[in-house]
Amino acid sequence: MRHSSPARLASLLLGGSLVLPLLAPVTALASPAPALGAPALPPSRGLRPVPLAALPELPAPNGLPRLQSQVSCPALQQRVASLVGEESFAWSISVADPAGRLLADVNGTRPRVPASNQKLVSSAFALDRLGPDHRLATQLWRLPDGTLRLTGQGDPDLALPHLQRFARLALNSGGSSGAIGSAVRMQLAEEPAQAWWPQGWNYADRAYAYGAPITRLALTSNAIDEAVSNPPSRLQILMKRAIAQQGGSAQLSVVSSRTPIPADAVLIHEEPSISMHGLLSLANTESHNFTAEVLLRTAADTWDLNEATRRNWSWLNAQGLPLEGVSIHDGSGLDRANRLTSRFLTALLLRMDQHPYRRDYVGSMAIAGQRGTLRNLFKGTSLDGQVYAKTGTLTGVRSISGLVLTSDGPRYFSAISNGASAPNATIGRVLRQVQNVSLCAGTQAY
């Protein structure tokens, strides 16, 4: 599968452009579609990082609006139920207003495979924990014995020009013994091969760009036209070539990224990534799996995926969100063992729209008819430019969650289909009903 480089996408997003080059989806599965009415979706592996019993439901922090548990708009509820009709078994849909009123809910507590709607979870976690100005760092160190070490945090935009800069700095920074013809000694700090892919990613997906391995030193996000199967090997080849082009030679080795940097090591150079705003936009506007996985690990301050998902879960619990049925297995949504509910996602969106960094969160999403994975959807309708959302697509799965602007303020929604026949059309019809705020004027819970 082909898509534009993260660097180009980020530059367009940060420049304020609403027109991006046409991209192929980055989250499609290679497995066959399930038969309608009997979606072949595997059960959750049940590997919740923390047992539900250990996580008492908490109130929303600081007195913020909390999603109600009873539907309060019968008119909208009836219209949504009518729109899904006989396919209600395949749908989970929830809609809320800024006061936390649950305006409509169809199977809102039923866990579903969310596909890339999972990125709404990891990006919220990252934004809250790291802030909007955080940048990933790729660093070149000189160790006490003169050896150099290159370390990274998974910058999705790391590219050949950066490598050439590091090569030039290595030759000028004492990375050799000083003898004539001596080679630069450099270590590349990387994760072990068994940690490059989340356990639940389909092996067929790992060959494609959207399923590229998750490593700390990832040139072009470990993807060219397809996934790079051995990133450290590729990096060694290209680093040696870059040093040779500068007139030197190199002795390169790979060490564990968990090997501590000595206290008396010297930082020679740090290459920062784009800001958090750009990273979030890559994850949510363009559904870049690699970036979402890096955001999860960075926010959790660990590249141990099990521990990272556990810390993400604990953070979600602290937000007072409805976690029953929720199961987190990665940061991007490519693992089909993930389970989210539409009521949980709607509550998360409500919570994040009250967050101090709400503009960064909402601004990272695709826009109907204009930007990202929604650029070609709902164009020319009343939803054009009025829906800010994250899409998700796997075989048999379609999800769109976000907010729709109305004359009475935003409405938060999540629509997850696991096996519906025409999900985009149904979601569009539902959202156009949501825009009709007169349906819910003055209604009470029932």
Image: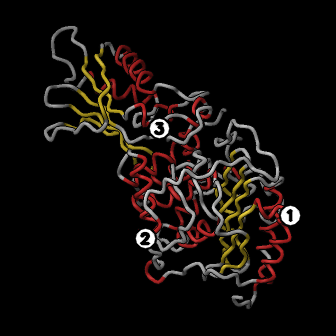
Residue 234 x, y percent position in the rendering: 45, 22
Type of the residue with mark 3: Ile
The one nearer the camera, 417 or 41, is: 41
Element on which disc 2 rests: helix
Foreground label between 2 and 1: 1
Proximity of marks 2 and 1: CB atoms separated by less than 8 Å: no
Task: Using the image, determine if residue 180 lies above or below residue 293.
Answer: above
Q: Quadrant of residue 436?
A: bottom right
Q: Residues within 10 Å of mark 3 (few under 14, many from 20)?
A: many
* Residue 12 appearing in the image: no
Colour scheme in use: secondary structure
Residue drawn at x 50%, y 40% as measured from the top left: 199
The residue tagged 3 is 214
Q: Name the mark nearer the viewer: 1 or 3.
A: 1
Q: First in sequence: mark 3 or mark 2? A: 3
Question: Considering only order in the chain, which callout, 3 or 1, is on the residue closer to the N terminus?
Answer: 1
**Marks 3 and 2, Cα distance to the nearest angstrom?**
28 Å
Residue type (three-letter) at the residue carrying disc 2: Ala
Instruction: Name the mark on residue 318.
Output: 2
Callout 2: 10 Å neighbours few (<14), some, many (20+)?
some
Write down the residue under mark 1.
Answer: 86
- Is residue 2 in sight in this rendering? yes
